[in-house]
Amino acid sequence: MLTSFAGVLFDGIAYGSLLFLISVGLSVTMGLMNFINLAHGAFAMLGGYLAVALMNNAGVPFLACLPLAFLGAAAAGVVLERLLFRRLYEASHLDQVLFSIGLTFMAIAGASYVWGPGQQPVRLPDFLRGQVHAAGLDLGAYRLFLIALVVAIAGALGLFVARTRFGAQVRAAVDDRHAAAGLGIHVDRVFCLTFALGSGLAGLGGALGIDVLGLDPVFPVKYLVYFLLVVTVGGTGTIKGPLVAALLLGVFDVAGKYYVPQVGAFVIYTLMVLMLILFPAGLYGRRA
Amino acid sequence: MSAQDRSAGLERAAATTIHRLPNARWRRPEALFWLLPVAAFFLFPGYLVLGSQVLITGLFAVSLDLILGYAGIVSLGHAAFFGVGAYTAGLLAAHGWGEPLSGLAAAATAAGAAGFAASFLVMRGQDLARLMVTLGIGLMLYEAANRAAFVTGGVDGLSGVTMWKLLGLFEFDLGGRTAYLYGLAVLFAIFVLLRRLVNSPFGLSLRGIREGGRRMPAIGASVRRREIAIFTVSAAVAGVAGALLAQTTQFVGLDTLGFQRSAELLIMLVLGGAGRLYGALIGAAAFILAQDYLSGMNPVYWQFWIGLLLVAVVLFARGGILGGLSAATRRIAGRAP
Amino acid sequence: MKRANIHAAIAGVALAAAAAGAAAQGAIRIGVIAEFSGPFAEYGRQMQNGIKTYMKQHGDTVAGRKIEILFKDTTGPAPDVAKRLAQELVTRDKVDFLAGFGLTPNALAAAPVATQAKVPMVIMNAASSVITTRSPYVVRVSMTLPQVTAPLAQWAAKNGIRKVYTLVADYAPGIDAEEAFRKAFAAAGGEVVDSVRVPLKNPEFAPFIQRIKDTRPEAVFIFVPAGEQSIAFMKGFNERGLAQAGIRLIATGDLTDDAVLDAIGEVSLGVITTFHYSAAHDSPENKAFLKTYAEVSGPQVRPNFMAVAAYDGMAAIYEVVKKLDGRIDADRAIEILKGFKTASPRGPIAIDPQTRDIVQTVYVRRVQKIGGEYYNVEFDRYPNVRDPGK
């Protein structure tokens, strides 16, 4: 009983950490630029397809593809932010929602055109497959790898935001954009780099997630709900928020499906509605 | 700048921004607009089935305009009420009561009740949280309808919806003639009522909520009660649209509750121009007709072009088609001596 | 002079009438309603290629009339769109046949149109039993889910598997499959120890697979939509060591669909499925089919059961046109279709005259690697299987 509970916990944490990795960029972007970007999943998808293209066409090993997916998605983020997104920072949320939905549609159609509508295969390196026996449990090797990687990244992000000067600039701009500009912080540059970082992380998450979540052209829309869920429940503008929310949602989703599979699908939505009633601005969000 | 210049500038600004109090009198372009679907009935007899779907979706879009264009509530789950209406009317007919008009009334009641219940959840929180709650409600209802497959038919849909003759006289025919006129009559009747509603003091207060909800209590207007009221009305109208679809196609699919339907509706409304009721109709017509025309050419690229169009509208033509039209007419009128 | 004029006029009118008559003879139109965009775009693509393959092999003219195909996109499960397309095809384009239908709700919504307009409707994919009961003009050439599930249960019982855990996606086809398996397995003496229905949009199979592992059945029967669900499940199945623990994986051929089998890769090795078509089926008809299919669609695309069903659907339609000598009458067409038999690329098939549904051989196959690619290799068969539901 306890081993199965621990197993469920482990799976839930792994699932949640993947969600966190993809969603953290969205949370920071939304808190920082007050921009609802529903196209965030498209960056994750881009990272995934980049990794697949590199692995299958150029024979690049899986681990090497990951930083490349990050860089590719970050580069795309920079380009799009400069050209398109920054025009809409002052626009209404509705406009931003529609704009990002439009971008998402274009991304889906583009991916469909280039790679076809089917699932993309991914071949993990051998040392990441199978199970590891630890503490009397059978833990999936790839899931262990995921958790380890996300813990490292979350830690690095936290340090980055709390200890570096750029991190301080980001925090200042999230708190009050105009005051930060008044202090001489290049808010434009902060936005651009933060957006790039967020998109890059999403791309990395997309590449990591191919084995767990699959990869096909409708990826951005399929998982949009989960990303938004994480950000809404966790609150925008922080890193802790989506981390806690993603882990919570991951664990509850997996536990719900294990213990009460008859209502498995409802658990995550009910949890979300409940959390939003209790914390309308999210767990760690600030009331505007 | 001297005081004189400043006041002159203000005067000029006041002259160019035309603030019109809502005028409930019917203007000529409106009358002409309503002649179009009547003319289409005679001019395009082979396209009436498409036409009825345009009318039904137009009604659905109008219902979304009530909460989005007038009260400023962004919803990604409005199809929930469309589906409630569709299933109510469909189940009623599938279980023996196929009278069309009473089916509409039942659907409106059921959907309105659902809207009333949902409004308490939706009213909490700001933009994003509200969006998520509407999304969540839509998804939960979809899953519930799938689960209750013994009632709703689940993914396979509800067949066996047999309708009696409309008003005891008109049978629903294969060419879609009865369905078209039925849909047009219902749309027009409801539209007249809603037009009256949005041009009333209540409608004005909704606009007040959209522009600056926090200041409303200062003038003694309860924001919450108005939002609940308009949300309920909007849900009821969406339910009528859903019922129309169920009755005219004699089938109810699970997709009536789906996210895709909610998302497409949002796009249609924005394309046409929110906040004017007519924009909803124009957007629905433009979207559906374009989709039918273009998907015949190459289905894969339809999604790309609609995405591009959406991006272009947001960047360059906020206010949609109707907004663009009225800006153009204003500019032309401004140029006239 | 005037008489000559009148003669000329009469001759002219006669010629025009003959020309009009010949034009009225014109093309035979087939309206194919299927999914060509969205998540089910593969269905439409396979069907379209299957149709093109048949027409490439057999030409596009039958009994002096040209065959014209009108492809219409439903974009997915959209019964109102499917019904509208059917209505338009029938009233505006005056098609002689309706065909296609990749999804059950779309077929169910369009069936009344076939009845009202008296147009034969050939189902080329949708697999729910009830579809053929909705209209006397509906004929199916694809398969039904119970038809391919029952032999699996019988095979499992015959081969020493007594305790099975079922896992299906929580939607109508999944529930149908669960029911069909349970009935047939109980009739063959087996026992379904436990069953679970997973949510339709489920990305995480870990908890369900863990439950299975904890229960330790002899085999798991699964039915999930083809695509990332089936891939995710099989990967999880392998990763968690269920195969090593001696639990076998049995399913219908939807799990190892030919079109996605290579994408699934080596985690599919050894999976046993029952289905009516495998691209590795060894027959001259299949070889010819594969060859022409590659010419039509390019070498990257492998045909799957939907392409074959579309191919056979065209064969049925061509037979009707030939037998009626180009003069299509719906009732007579249905009579001819009821007795239809042919050697399809999948094996011998026939249309049951009572139910207008397909009767065919269901094969038991195992996934093996042949020449660097993965195929379902047949090793047992159940001939002349009818739809158990009717």
Image (spheres, coloured by chain):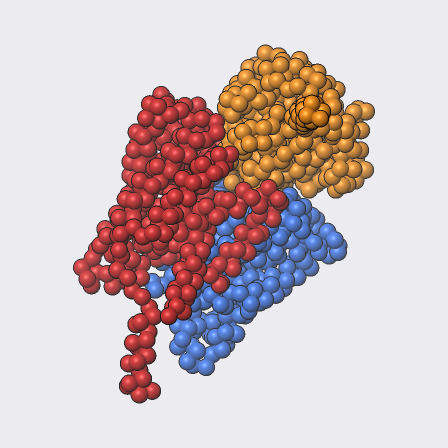
Residue B331: image location, x then y, percent: 41, 66
Residue C134: image location, x then y, percent: 51, 20
Q: Is residue A111 visible?
A: yes
Q: Which chain is red?
A: B
Number of numbered discs visible in the structure rendering: 0
Chain C, colour shown:
orange
| Residue C10 higher or lower than C332, as above or below | below
Which residue in the rendered view is the most extreme toward the front? C1
Q: Quarter of the image holding residue A240?
A: bottom left
Q: Residue at x 33, y 68 (%)?
A: B17
Residue A118: image location, x then y, percent: 64, 43
Q: Quadrant of the N terminus of chain B?
A: bottom left
Residue A196: image location, x then y, percent: 56, 66
Q: Residue at x 45, y 67 (%)?
A: A89
Which residue in the rendered view is the most extreme toward the top? C354
Q: In this view of the protein, which residue sits in the foreground, C381 or B199?
A: B199
Q: Is residue B197 left or right of residue C300?
A: left
| Residue B286 higher or lower than B246, as above or below | below
| Residue A196 higher or lower than C228, as above or below | below
